[in-house]
Image: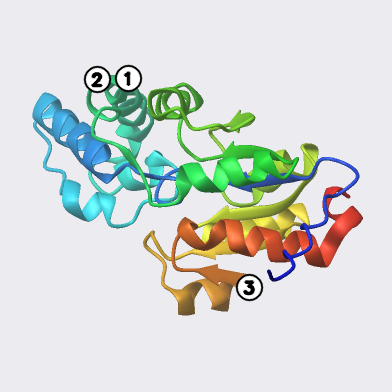
Amino acid sequence: MEPSAPPTPRPSTPFTIGFDLDMTLVDSRPGIADTYRALAAETGTFIDADLAVSRLGPPVEQEIAHWFPADRVRAMSDRYRALYPAHGVEGTLPLPGAREALDAIRARGGRSMVVTAKHTPNARLHIEHLQLAADVLVGDLWAERKGVALREQGASVYVGDHVGDVRAATAAGALSVSVTTGPCDEHELRSAGTAVVLPDLLSFPTWLDNWLEGHGENAGA
């Protein structure tokens, strides 16, 4: 009988790993597209919902600005957020490996947090509906502003799918881990400065074990 592999070292203090939400943990494209279609029908304004969901990541105001004049962007963004609970939640599914990634962190003594540009109440609807086991949720933040929340929570790693998420990790002094399940490909993500690129979260638990083995007690620093 071959000897079993030695256990992965556990840090002496809890470590924290952050995740983006849209297109990192969840595929929210169907629900977001339906919300844009509802907004278009209500206002009589053409919105190409398929185009909109091909460039997810930044705050909704940036997308709304493509379809409405500047003086209506704030009001239409607020209306989109108000329509979202009825149209954006049911069609959203976890991306492959999302639950396993969060469970792996908890099983190894860590904390997980979600930091997203999505409006916090709407992000919480996704977390609760899909029963994603995140310990902390912070919404309404983008790029470097995400870095503030990550730093406050002591996150060592931030996982995202967009170059804005790489900027967030850099601002927080955290390791940037990227997945190619969103709008940015590996070249874009590496050019932005990410340290690690994974095809999806299915490979995250193995990566996590390797990272913990390399960091040991310093993982929670």
Marked residue nearer the N-terminal end (3 or 1): 1
Measuring 58% from the left and 40% from the top, which residue is drawn there? Answer: 103
Percent position of residue 104, x then y: 61, 46
Q: Is residue 177 visible?
A: yes
Q: Secondary structure at mark 3?
A: loop
Q: Is residue 154 left or right of residue 168?
A: right
Spatial CA span between label 3 and label 1? 35 Å
- Whether residues under marks 1 and 2 lie with C-beta atoms below 8 angstroms apart, the answer is no
Measuring 44% from the left and 42% from the top, which residue is drawn there? Answer: 59
Q: Is residue 214 left or right of residue 157?
A: right
Location of the N terminus by quadrant is bottom right
Disc 1 packing (10 Å; few <14; some 14–19; many ≥20): some
Marked residue nearer the N-terminal end (2 or 3): 2
Q: Eyeballing the image, is 131 above or below 202? A: above
Spatial CA span between label 2 and label 3? 37 Å
Percent position of residue 139, x then y: 55, 32
Q: Is residue 22 left or right of residue 51?
A: right
Q: Quickly name the residue at label 2.
A: 86
Mark drawn on residue 82: 1
Q: Quickly name the residue at label 3.
A: 193
Percent position of residue 78, x then y: 36, 24
Spatial CA span between label 1 and label 2? 8 Å
Mark drawn on residue 42: none
Disc 3 packing (10 Å; few <14; some 14–19; many ≥20): some
Amino acid, disc 3: Gly
Amino acid, disc 1: Ala
Amino acid, disc 2: Ala
